[in-house]
Image (tube, grey):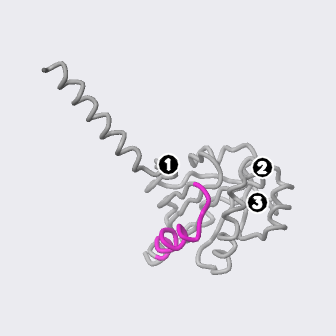
């Protein structure tokens, strides 16, 4: 009797863990940066390579860091959402051009519209590595004190923007 009960209990335990795993959203990749200071960088601007941008330049402001590339298909999907966000002028939007050719990036923005207040170049991917970028696109919400408050993995949708990011941005701007 005992030799049948132990495999049955083991099967039930495995089934419970499998069932719980199936309910998880694979796009929700937790970031260890949440509620920690944003990684420091000094990066050349895409349209003015002699000028640098650092997170310290944005202290006192809520801002988004959107990681993108001209070769990224999902970035094309989210681009109209970013253009609409830029029209609203509700938050500073910084683009991190990730492992991309600067000329291709400039052409891509010229063709699709440039929603960014500034774009910076991360040709070798070091800034992305510091931010724990798994792939493009990814978007980080950073508060007035320079603390990462949210990470959006994958293409930013109008639903995610309206339901998650904009309410968080409004809350952070009021603090």
Residue count near mark 1 (Cα–Cα under 10 Å), binned few <14, some 14–19, many ≥20 = few
Is 25 within the magenta?
no
Helix, strand or loop status at disc 3:
loop
In the rendered structure, are the residues bearing label 2 and label 3 in contact, judged by CB atoms less than 8 Å apart?
no
Q: What residue range appears in magenta?
A: 154-170
What residue sits 41% from the left and 46% below the top?
Answer: 22
Name the quadrant containing residue 92. bottom right
* Disc on res. 100: 2
What residue sits 53% from the left and 63% below the top?
Answer: 142
What residue sits 32% from the left and 37% below the top?
Answer: 15
Residue placed furthest toward the top? 3
Residue labelled with disc 1:
26
Residue 172, above or below 73:
below
Nearest to viewer (mark 2 / mark 3): 2
In-front residue for pair 73/103: 73
Among numbered discs 2 and 3, the one appearing first in the sequence: 3
> In 3D space, how far apart are the residues under numbered discs 2 and 1 (Cα atoms)?
26 Å
- Quadrant containing the C terminus is bottom left
Nearest to viewer (mark 3 / mark 1): 1
> In 3D space, how far apart are the residues under numbered discs 2 and 3 (Cα atoms)?
13 Å
**Predominant secondary structure, magenta span:** helix
């Amino acid at each position: 009797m005992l030799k049948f009960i132990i495999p049955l209990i083991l099967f039930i335990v495995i089934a419970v863990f499998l069932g719980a795993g199936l309910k998880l959203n694979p796009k929700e990749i937790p970031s260890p940066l949440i509620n920690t200071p944003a990684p420091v960088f000094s990066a050349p601007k895409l349209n003015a390579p002699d000028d640098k941008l650092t997170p310290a330049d944005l202290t006192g402001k809520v801002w988004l860091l959107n990681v993108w590339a001209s070769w990224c298909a999902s970035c094309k999907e989210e681009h109209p959402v970013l253009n609409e966000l830029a029209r609203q002028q509700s938050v500073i939007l910084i683009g991190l051009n990730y492992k991309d050719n600067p000329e291709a990036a400039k052409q891509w923005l010229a063709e699709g519209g440039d929603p960014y207040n500034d774009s910076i170049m991360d040709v070798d991917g070091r800034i992305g590595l510091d931010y724990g970028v798994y792939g493009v696109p990814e978007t980080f919400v950073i508060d007035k004190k320079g603390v990462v408050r949210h990470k959006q993995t994958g293409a930013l949708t109008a639903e995610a923007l309206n339901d998650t990011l904009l309410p968080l941005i409004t809350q952070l701007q009021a603090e």
